[in-house]
Amino acid sequence: MTALATLAMVNIDAADPEVLAAFYHQVLGWDVTHSERDYAMISDGTTAVGFGRVEGYRAPQWPDAGKQFHLDFHVGDLAEAEARCLELGAAKPEFQPGGDRWTVLTDPSGHPFCICLKS
């Protein structure tokens, strides 16, 4: 199949883009390539994630069937990655459907993300 488009980047709404860029910079080790009050971006040189300020931003709730997306990250050690993410400002919701294979966390703006053991 011939592609109609290529993915340029992912943009995530936020109350404070600079805080989210700094958080995900620490989680992924990607460079902060842009950081200002209304917009920030991280990149590994191939893929980019942007964070845009939305006035009146409301964090998604977990669990909530109305959430629209979440990010998954592979980690080598689930407990170690969880502890480090919590140190960086993540939170751990009470509801955890992953058993011992993945953990749901929320970033400083409340977006859920999963840390997952790579199979």
Image (cartoon, rainbow, N blue to C red):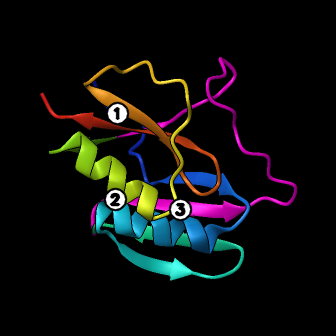
Crowd rating for badge 3 (residues with CA inside 10 Å; few <14, some 14–19, many 20+): many
The x and y percentages for residue 115 are: 33, 40
Circle 2 is placed at which residue position? 84
Q: Alpha carbon of mark 3 to alpha carbon of mark 1: how far?
A: 23 Å
Judge from the rendering whether residue 95 lies leftward or rightward of residue 47; answer left or right: right
Pointer 1 with pointer 2, Cβ within 8 A: no
The mark nearer the N terminus, 3 or 2, is: 3
Q: Is residue 58 magenta?
A: yes
Quick check: 105 left or right of 53? Answer: left
Q: Answer above or below: position of 35 versus 75.
A: below
Find residue 61 and report its image quarter.
top right
Give the magenta range: 45-72
Instruction: Give me the disc on residue 50.
Output: 3
Q: Position of residue 28 (x, y in %)?
A: 31, 61
* Residue drawn at x 80%, y 52% as measured from the top left: 57
Crowding at dot 1, Cα within 10 Å, few <14 / some 14-19 / many 20+, comes out as few
> Is residue 41 positioned above or below 3 on the image?
below
Q: Is residue 35 above or below residue 107?
A: below
Q: Which residue is mark 1?
A: 3
Mark 1 and mark 2 lie on one chain; the one further toward the N terminus is 1
Residue 105: image location, x then y, percent: 48, 41
